[in-house]
Amino acid sequence: MCGIIGVTGTGPVTPRLIDSLKRLEYRGYDSAGVAALVDGVTERRRAQGKIRNLETVLAETPLNATVGIGHTRWATHGAPTTENAHPHKAGRVTLVHNGIIENFAELKAELAAEGHVFESQTDTEVVAHLLDRELAKSNDAIAAFKRVLDRLTGAYALAVLIDGEDEQILGARRGSPLVVGWGEDEMYLGSDALAVGPFTQQISYLEEGDYVVLNRAGARFFDSTGSEVERAVVQVSASSAMVEKGAYRHFMEKEIHEQPDSVQHTLSAYLDLVSGTARSQPVDFSKLDRVQIVACGTAFFAGQIGRYAFERLAGLPCDVEIASEFRYREPAVSPSTLAVAVSQSGETADTLACLTWCKAHGLKTAAIVNVHTSSMAREADVLWPTHAGPEIGVASTKAFTAQVAALLALAVAAGVARGRIDATREAELVKALFEAPRLISEALAMDADIRREVVELAKADDVLFLGRGAMYPLAMEGALKLKEISYIHAEGYAAGELKHGPIALIDEFTPTVALAPLDDVFEKTASNLQEVAARGGPVIMIAPAEAEAPHGASIRRIDAPDCHPLIAPLVYAVPMQLLAYYTAVQKGTDVDQPRNLAKSVTVE
Ligand code: M6R
């Protein structure tokens, strides 16, 4: 999760860029850099490590300018070196980027064949070369920028300077957030409201696929079709921008939309797309004979999804247990078991007690936690962080997908360490995982279809969620989300278990939500849905458009993005969350602070 800032104004720009970058440190970084237009030509300063290293460089070689961009980098492509630090430059173009350009390897090969020479290992530099090439064809910067955006696959936010285009900054957003800040004779571009917080509280949020052109007098916004559009200006409190809802009605809605970014940030901690490899881990998976996951609530369902991946990819037996049960049942454990606590807060009393118990019984322990200073983070032998950022909504969303992302990535690492995954398969799986941020963005666009369905769903007293394989724990998570915030009774079942009892619940008033990605059990899930439809039960089937629909008048379809089966739990989590969210909004419940619940459960 990189941080972006851009400033175009009349005062000295570098102190402003540095001020903003310091506020973006919370996003995590390994290097930082700035670029500014000096007499119409861009100059860069970059440094590895902390922002103060960049300040030292700037003190030695100052940049005197009024227009500039800055970046804190969290390495995804290439090592955290000065060469790989942003901004990247090619010819007249200098830019910074947050996100992943998935098709960078193809684009790089195309450009290299034309003689372009690359300085870094990053995916970002490819975008600079592409834009420079387009500018050479015609000097219309906005049109050239649009042509480049049309070539990119992935999730990204960009801020761009062009030599000779004084005062101007270009920006674009797809998947990763980007905001415009409005000042007095000065304009700003930032990766979030916090980035521009030191300068203004007047913010416009770019919508998915938007691009923007700034100069100190204002901003022109364009949508993904290239049409010029208006974007509203909203007031955001600078001091608390990090925990502000921004343009969203609820924190939960905001956090759902942050998932392309939070999943990417988390994956990047465990995987390297350039080399197509999983990063080495402080656990020797080849020496383990079992993984024991302990967790509560949503984190428990994430653990269950992790189990499918550990067993399928790494042949590593994996048990997952609710912490409050594990803790008191005197479990039999073998010394070559790795105990893994999964928790957003890192403070959940039952999960923490299990971690302590496992440690006391001589097991090596690890904690997958989102709060990196929490008790579990400190107690465990190994800290496996998730990078979801602060989660305010009581109903967990982005912390859940970050937990799933970490578990899937670790399962790949385990498979490699245990000789179950060769280099070709490792590269294929790493590539598939890095497609998740883009496909999560696409899943967010299911919004309108889901709103249409909740009108009926909100009237139900009971709802069933069905899935097979890793979609089974996701079905349980979908049911939990709906229960928590809409107060509608819901249960998640393995689709194959339906006819062993729960099918007795089916009638015309009991909707069934089915998660049916096109995987090796799709046909089986589809026939279970026909069993529901045959009994007059309304079905909402979430499946790719390509999937052949089972027949039945009561089956309604919501089209989901087609995806690699490994990342289906990440992509299909989004419609589950949106379904719960909009149902709760329809019912008028307190979405962010549902009754009887607390964000962190530190009692038994
Ligand atoms: O902080 P933790 O992840 O350990 O919390 C565990 C559960 O309390 C939590 O996931 C809870 O189920 C959420 N309200 C789910 O939305």
Image (cartoon, helix red, strand yellow):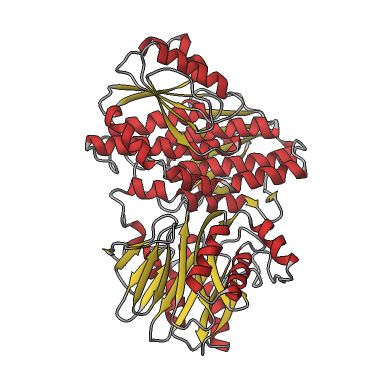
Q: Measured from the top left, where is residue 155 in percent x and y?
A: 52, 54
How far from the left and from the top, in percent, is residue 21? 46, 71
Task: Choose top left, top right, bottom left or bottom right for residue 584.
Answer: top left
Q: Which of the 4 image quarters holds residue 247? A: bottom left
Ligand 1 image position (quadrant): top left
Q: Nearer the viewer, residue 540 or 600?
A: 540
Q: Residue at x 28, y 27 (%)?
A: 456
Residue ID at (54%, 84%): 58
From the viewer's perspective, tell me whether residue 261 is left or right of residue 435. left
How many numbered callouts? 0
Q: Relative to 29, does residue 579 appear above or below in the rendering?
A: above
Residue 333 x, y percent position in the rendering: 62, 27
Q: Is residue 198 visible?
A: no
Q: Position of residue 402 (x, y in %)?
A: 50, 45
Relative to 292, say whether 390 is above or below. below
For image coordinates 56% across by 26% down, the residue present is 469
| Image quadrant in which the C terminus is located | top left
Residue under the point 47% across and 67% down: 4
Residue 11 visible: yes
Between residues 267 and 322, which one lies in front from this camera angle? 267
Viewer-nearest residue: 384 or 392: 392
- Kindly indicate the quadrant of the structure image that contains residue 215: bottom left
Residue at the outermost front position: 138
